[in-house]
Amino acid sequence: MSNSIKNEHTDKLVKALLSIKTAEEMFSFLEDLCTIAEIQSMSQRLMIAELLDKDIPYNDIVKITGVSTATISRVNRALQYGKDGYKTVLKNLQENG
C-alpha cells in the first residue's frame, strides 16, 4: 500500500469497513460517510473496471456509462499498474456472485 494513504486514520477506516456485516449496514455507513455523488462515482468506477476486464472497448464504455475517456483511462491504469485492488474485488465478486 502506498505510504501516502496509509496512516492511523485510514487504518481505522479499513477496520470500520471490515467490521460491517450486512449490505444494509454498508449502505447506511456509505450514506453517512459519503455524498451520493461520491458513492455513484465509486460504483461507476467499479462498473468501468468490470467492463474493461471483459475487454469492452473505450467507446462502448462511454456509451454504456456516459463517463469520459479520461475516467476510463484512470480506471484502466489502476487495473494495469495499480495495487490489484480492482482485480481482487472483481475476482471476489465473480466467485461470490
Image (cartoon, rainbow, N blue to C red):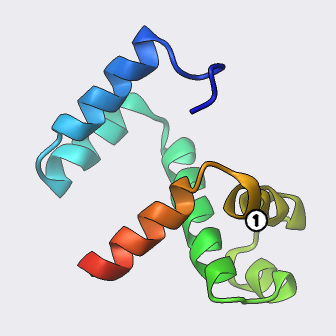
State the residue in front, 91 or 72: 91
For disc 1, the marked residue is 76
Number of callouts:
1
Q: Residue 15: percent from the left, percent from the top?
A: 27, 28
State the residue in front, 44 or 9: 9
Residue at left 69%, top 84%?
A: 64
**Residue type (three-letter) at the residue carrying disc 1:** Asn
State the residue in front, 90 or 45: 90
| Quadrant location, the C terminus | bottom left
Q: Residue 25: percent from the left, percent from the top?
A: 16, 44
Which quadrant holds residue 2? top right
Q: Is residue 13 found left or right of 53 in the rendered image?
A: left
Residue at left 28%, top 37%?
A: 17
Residue 38 to residue 89: above or below: above
Residue 91 to residue 32: above or below: below
Q: Secondary structure at mark 1?
A: helix
Q: Residues within 10 Å of mark 1 (few under 14, many from 20)?
A: some
Residue at left 55%, top 60%?
A: 86
Q: Residue 81: percent from the left, percent from the top?
A: 75, 55
Q: Is residue 93 found left or right of 15 in the rendered image?
A: right
Residue at left 49%, top 48%?
A: 39
Q: Is residue 41 found left or right of 89 in the rendered image?
A: right
Q: Residue 1: percent from the left, percent from the top?
A: 56, 33
Furthest-left residue in view?
21
Furthest-top residue in view?
8
Which quadrant holds residue 46? bottom right
